Image (cartoon, helix red, strand yellow):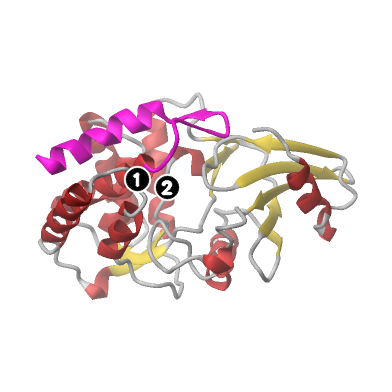
Amino acid sequence: MAITDEHLKRLHNIDCIQPIETVEPLVGGLSHHCFKVTSLQQMYFVKLFSTNQSLSGYCNTSHCQVNPAHHLTIQHAAYLKGFSAKIIEADELGSYMVCEYIDGVTLLNSTANDTTKLKSLANILAKCHQLDAAVAPLDLLSVVESLIVKCPLTQADKQKIITRFNTQLKQVTVNVGDLVLCHGDVNFSNIILKGEDSFLIDWEYCCLAEAEYDIAMAISINKLSTNQQLIFLEYCHNSYSVNVKPSFSTDKVHMYLALCNIINALWFEQQPANVEGCSLLNEHDHFNGFIQNFLR
């Protein structure tokens, strides 16, 4: 990602990271611009939210960001539990956020084997689901209706997807008493390994939902194979027993997985083939198949 004059201007307007010594763009975020900033030999992680997608401009659904105050409160709660970054500063308008820089490696880029990665994924999901926070409940139908607007599909296909999605959604019986804080985007790029510790970042998409939804979304967004899913679900069950949380339904995970695949497919359908130097061709090819099967 190239650093623009606009990026530099916005960074130099953030008092807590002055004087800026070095700025390094961080590749990975597809919705916002992220940087590693050095100031007075201190490293910071700085996220500049897109001008049309600031924290204060989001609705309270998954794939739409939560109220900024809630988002910051949730990340702070995770930080106090030892598995997220400390927030240094965030402006009232929600145009930027400054956090401590975690000098580690993402799970995606880690040299760890698949088994270790899946275990880390399961453990951090279980920790997330233990947090207490006031966020809006998940509304999957609204998510799909919002995402599909900008998709390059015919109106007839859009209506068919919404109708079939709603039919499948009605088959999921939501137990209100089992709702937990869900991250909503636990992909391998959002987990940072540092020594023996794991940190979860990018809390903008969290919501109140059943744990099965978050587990299914993790399976979908990380494109886990059938064998990887079996291993991951076993680790999830183990993590839940350790964290004294009621077990979850594997069958319900699979019901949510079908819905999550469509949500991710619609999201990637709107994206260009390349975003900030990141190729999305594999994601386009992978998730487009779910739309085509849904339309048959």
Using a 10 Å C-alpha cutoff, classify the residue at mark 2 as few (fewer than 14 neighbours), some (14 to 19) or many (20 or more).
Answer: many
Query: Which stretch is magenta?
Result: 270-296
Q: Secondary structure at mark 2?
A: loop
Residue picked out by circle 1 = 218
Q: Is residue 117 above or below residue 198?
A: above
Q: Is residue 186 visible?
A: yes
Which quadrant would the C terminus be assigned to in this image? Answer: top left
Q: Is residue 60 above or below residue 237?
A: below
Coordinates of residue 222 in the picture (x, y in percent): 36, 37
Q: CA distance from mark 1 to mark 2?
A: 5 Å
Q: Secondary structure at mark 1?
A: helix
- Examine the structure image and report whether residue 281 is included in the region drawn in magenta: yes
Q: Are marks 1 and 2 in contact (CB under 8 Å)?
A: yes
Coordinates of residue 245 in the picture (x, y in percent): 31, 63
Using a 10 Å C-alpha cutoff, classify the residue at mark 1 as few (fewer than 14 neighbours), some (14 to 19) or many (20 or more).
Answer: many
Q: Residue at 70% of width from left, 51% of height from top?
A: 100
Residue picked out by circle 2 = 186
Left or right of 285 on screen, residue 206? right
Three-letter amino acid code of the residue under disc 2: Val
Coordinates of residue 256 in the picture (x, y in percent): 21, 53
Which quadrant would the N terminus be assigned to in this image? Answer: top right
Q: Earlier in the sequence, mark 1 or mark 2?
A: 2
Between residues 64 and 19, which one lies in front from this camera angle?
A: 64
Q: Residue at 32% of width from left, 66% of height from top?
A: 138
Left or right of 291 on screen, residue 197? right
Between residues 142 and 65, which one lies in front from this camera angle?
A: 142
Coordinates of residue 226 in the picture (x, y in percent): 21, 32
